[in-house]
Amino acid sequence: QVQLVESGGGLVQAGGSLRLSCAASVGIFSINLMGWYCQAPGKQRELVAVITSGGSTNYADSVKDRFTISRDNAKNTVYLQMNSLKPEDTAVYYCTVIFRGRQYWGQGTQVTVSS
């Protein structure tokens, strides 16, 4: 069982920045894949970014060059640095991990970008 707790969401103006954090209840050095998804009202949940234990990353086209995913194994935390935010980035952002064959989700954190 893995518990994930996200933080760092909030209200920001377009062009601003936020950093989301996701703290895991287990040592993430053993977790190969960690990532962030987002879900806007009336839309399906979609991938934002993922990172492997080796540090390889992958991003949705819509956030490339603006968002950066990273992980700190010593703190059991994965981060999402979001820069140059746009109103269309407004969504609930969820942290997720694949651990021992199961996918776990955090409770989500709201990001609202005003124009």
Image (tube, rainbow, N blue to C red):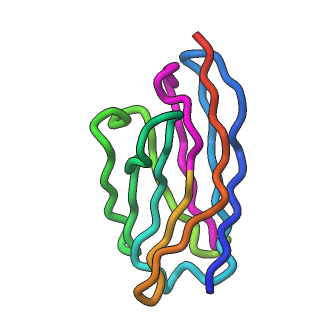
* Residue occupying image coordinates x 45% and y 45%: 68
In the image, taking residue 114 as reference, residue 100 lies left or right, namely left
Farthest front residue in view:
42
In the image, taking residue 37 as reference, residue 21 lies left or right, namely right
In the image, taking residue 63 as reference, residue 28 lies left or right, namely right
Q: Position of residue 73 (x, y in %)?
A: 57, 74
| Residue toward you, 21 or 4 | 4
Q: Position of residue 86 (x, y in %)?
A: 49, 21
Which image quadrant: the C terminus? top right
| Residue toward you, 35 or 39 | 39
Which image quadrant: the N terminus? bottom right
Residue 78 in the magenta stretch? The answer is yes
* Residue occupying image coordinates x 63% and y 35%: 111
Q: Could you tell me how many numbered marks the image carries?
A: 0
Q: Please determine whether, in this image, residue 95 is positioned above or below residue 18.
A: below
Q: Position of residue 55 (x, y in %)?
A: 38, 66
* Residue occupying image coordinates x 44% and y 76%: 98
* Residue occupying image coordinates x 41% and y 45%: 44
What stretch of residues is rendered in magenta?
76-93
